[in-house]
Amino acid sequence: MVLFEDALSIVIGQATVPESGRVSLSASAGRVLAEDIFSDMEMPPFDKSAVDGYACRMGDIAPLPSPGKEPGTSDAGLWKSATLAVIETIPAGKIPLTTVGPRECSKIMTGAMVPRGADCVVMVEDAVETTADTVRFTRFPRAKNICYKGEDIRLGDPVLSKGTKIAPSHVAVLASVGAVTPMVYNQPRVGIISTGDELVEPFRMPGLAQIRNSNGCQLEAQVNSVPAIADYIGIAPDDGPGLRSVIDRALTENDVVLLSGGVSMGEFDHVPGILREAGVEILFEKIAIQPGKPTVFGRKGDKFVFGLPGNPVSSFVLFEMMVRPFLLKMMGHKEHTPDLFLRMGVDFSRRKSERKSLIPVQIREGAVFPVEYHGSAHIQAYSKANAILIMEIGTTDINKGEQVHVRPI
Ligand code: AMP
Ligand code: MG
């Protein structure tokens, strides 16, 4: 039996660097960048107005200090010049035609280019048009309301680094610097096999002594959410030869194979033996974790196999704790650190502490609360949870308010 930390480092240490290729921007979300991205321009590309208003010269509207008031504040006193001539209207996307001179201003829209001569923009909310071409300001601007050329990103600046998993906000950065076909790592193809003679597919009503296969589609959904490429193969029988042929096929067609069931000590738990027969080198087959003890991990050439315990909760949590980080590494992700350290919302205890335990919890109002949980067959428990509480070996009691380690799911 290995410690979870050792099992995880074996798994992560085995993950190989994938090949890469270019994808369109719209297909890039969820993929991992295989190149550093640099900006091909200044951002913003020109001095641009942050508001709808009037671009003018600060010197024309600077308030005269009055006794007892701070200069530069809205109620600081008299305007040097309350009324300016409006010389142009500048919509976004148009180059201003005229330079703003003394006692002049140009009406300007948010995102439009600030005209030469102007050094601030007074918001439209603080202005009254007194005639068709004059405007009076009612309040001194609290800011210059200009986003200056290059203040966010300079030409040639690194904006995203290799190994970044592309989130929607990263897609926007890629778009803004014109990286429309980013180089990303290939995703592993993951074959999924449910083992067990008692299983029927979910669209069937189980007969006596049968149950529905919930792991197959659960694992498929988990693989897709990484996102890796899921290949649901089906239900394999518990008998040796039948199982062997399904495993052989799965290993040929996929980079990684996930099996559920058939890994414990029962007479029909053939998975570890058959994997060995199929030429898979088993790197561990028991982890000091609860649930999930009989988890198997092995390698055949450049193919990898996880044998996950059949109980749906065990299969679910082992995927989250071990298979997800492995698949992310197999698709080039440089780090996977989703864990949070939060306060326990209630007192909690367990009887045995010789294994690390994984407990379904809900994070709400900034604290951690266990959900009703009857053990590793209780699939509803995780449907009500939004995190896994990780309880270390040797810990039996956690007091309300104590800091705990949780992994959001
Ligand atoms: P095993 O690991 O094969 O001994 O299975 C442990 C428990 O999980 C048994 O009660 C199985 O019936 C159940 N089980 C195994 N595979 C699945 C599956 N694909 N879907 C739902 N339950 C399963
Ligand atoms: Mg079984």
Image (spheres, helix red, strand yellow):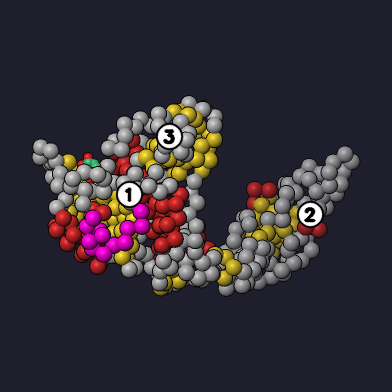
Q: Is mark 2 within 8 Å of ligand 1?
A: no
**Where residue 235 sits: x, y (%)?**
18, 52
Q: Looking at numbered disc 3 in the image, what kind of residue is underneath it? A: Ser
**Which residue is outermost to the front?**
1
Q: Which residue is mark 2?
A: 61
**Which residue is outermost to the right?**
67
Question: Residue at 37% across / 40% down in the picture?
Answer: 290
First to last magenta residue range:
273-284
Residue 353, disc: 3
**Where residue 99 sits: x, y (%)?**
72, 69
Q: Residues within 10 Å of mark 2 (few under 14, many from 20)?
A: many
| Nearest to the observer: residue 309 or residue 129 | 309
Q: Residues within 10 Å of mark 3 (few under 14, many from 20)?
A: some
| Nearest to the observer: residue 385 or residue 355 | 355
Q: In the picture shown, does residue 131 fall above or below 340?
A: below
Q: Looking at numbered disc 1 in the image, what kind of residue is underneath it? A: Thr
| Residue contact between numbered discs 2 and 3, judged by CB atoms under 8 Å | no
Name which of mark 3 and mark 1 comes first in the sequence.
1
Q: Is residue 319 visible?
A: yes
Q: Residues within 10 Å of mark 1 (few under 14, many from 20)?
A: many
Question: Residue at 59% across / 68% down in the picture?
Answer: 158
The quarter of the image holding the C terminus is: top left
Name which of mark 2 and mark 1 comes first in the sequence.
2
Question: Cα distance, mark 2 to mark 1?
Answer: 73 Å
Q: Which residue is mark 1?
A: 295
**Where residue 6 sits: x, y (%)?**
44, 52
For residue 288, what is the image quadrant? top left
Q: Is residue 278 magenta?
A: yes
Horizontal side, residue 112 vs residue 9: left or right:
right
